[in-house]
Image (cartoon, rainbow, N blue to C red):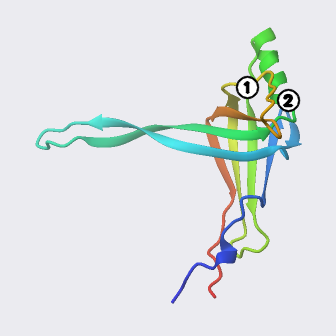
């Protein structure tokens, strides 16, 4: 009987993220969490002879969020540049999941044309042991560079 081995579950800490902004690659070591979701956009289709509504996929939308330690000015500078010049910044984020104890290998996903929705421009908090911030974003492309493999059977 096959079963999933505990060591094949991927540790949330065993990952890396990189931002490629204007050709410059920056390791995003300050990321606490990052999650990106692709949602289909669907049209409701009504047809003769059928009472129910059918659905047809007509597109998709990419959204995401990340919680980061309040330890980089990069995103604030991007927003400030937009405020001052009107020039928006689109960049890519590469996320690597790789747990050396797992037999499933590595998965690498690239989010293309990431665009920030909002940025905390300044923050203080006397109740926090460490400062962090939540950043919402959109993206309009995805590449899967490396896939997990089937786990080894024990």
Q: Is residue 15 above or below residue 102?
A: above
Q: Seen in the image, is 49 located left or right of residue 73?
A: left
Q: Which residue is mark 1?
A: 119
The percent coordinates of residue 107 (x first, y second) are 70, 60
Picture quarter with the C terminus: bottom right
* Among the two numbered marks 1 and 2 on one chain, the one whose residue lies closer to the N terminus: 2
Q: Is residue 5 above or below residue 29?
A: below
The percent coordinates of residue 88 (x first, y second) are 74, 20
* Residue at the image point whose x is 69% and y is 66% from the top: 10
Foreground of the two, 37 or 111: 37
Foreground of the two, 1 or 39: 1
* Distance from the alpha carbon under mark 1 to that under mark 2: 10 Å
Q: Is residue 93 above or below residue 103?
A: above
Q: How many marks?
A: 2
The quadrant where residue 65 appears? top right
The quadrant where residue 132 appears? top right
Q: Is residue 137 above or below residue 1?
A: above
Q: Which residue is mark 2?
A: 74
The reply to whether callout 1 and callout 2 are in contact (CB within 8 Å) is no
Q: Could you classify mark 2 by the number of other residues whose Cα lies within 10 Å: few (under 14), some (14-19), or many (20 or more)?
A: few
* Residue at the image point whose x is 73% and y is 29% from the top: 90
Q: Could you classify mark 1 by the number of other residues whose Cα lies within 10 Å: few (under 14), some (14-19), or many (20 or more)?
A: some
The percent coordinates of residue 49 (x first, y second) are 11, 43
Residue with the most extreme front position: 127
The percent coordinates of residue 147 (x first, y second) are 66, 63
């Amino acid at each position: 009987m096959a079963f999933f081995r505990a060591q094949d579950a991927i540790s949330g800490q065993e990952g890396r993220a990189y931002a490629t902004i204007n050709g410059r690659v920056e390791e995003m070591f300050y990321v606490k969490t990052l999650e990106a979701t692709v949602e289909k956009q669907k049209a409701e289709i009504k047809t003769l002879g059928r009472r129910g509504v059918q659905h047809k996929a007509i597109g998709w939308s990419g959204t995401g969020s990340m919680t980061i330690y309040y330890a980089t000015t990069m995103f604030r500078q991007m927003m400030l540049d937009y405020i001052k010049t009107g020039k928006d910044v689109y960049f890519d984020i590469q996320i690597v999941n790789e747990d050396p104890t797992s037999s499933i290998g590595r998965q690498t996903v690239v989010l293309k044309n990431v665009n920030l929705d909002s940025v905390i421009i300044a923050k203080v908090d006397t109740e926090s042991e460490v400062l962090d911030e939540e950043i919402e974003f959109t993206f309009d492309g995805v590449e899967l560079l490396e896939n997990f493999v089937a786990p080894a059977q024990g």
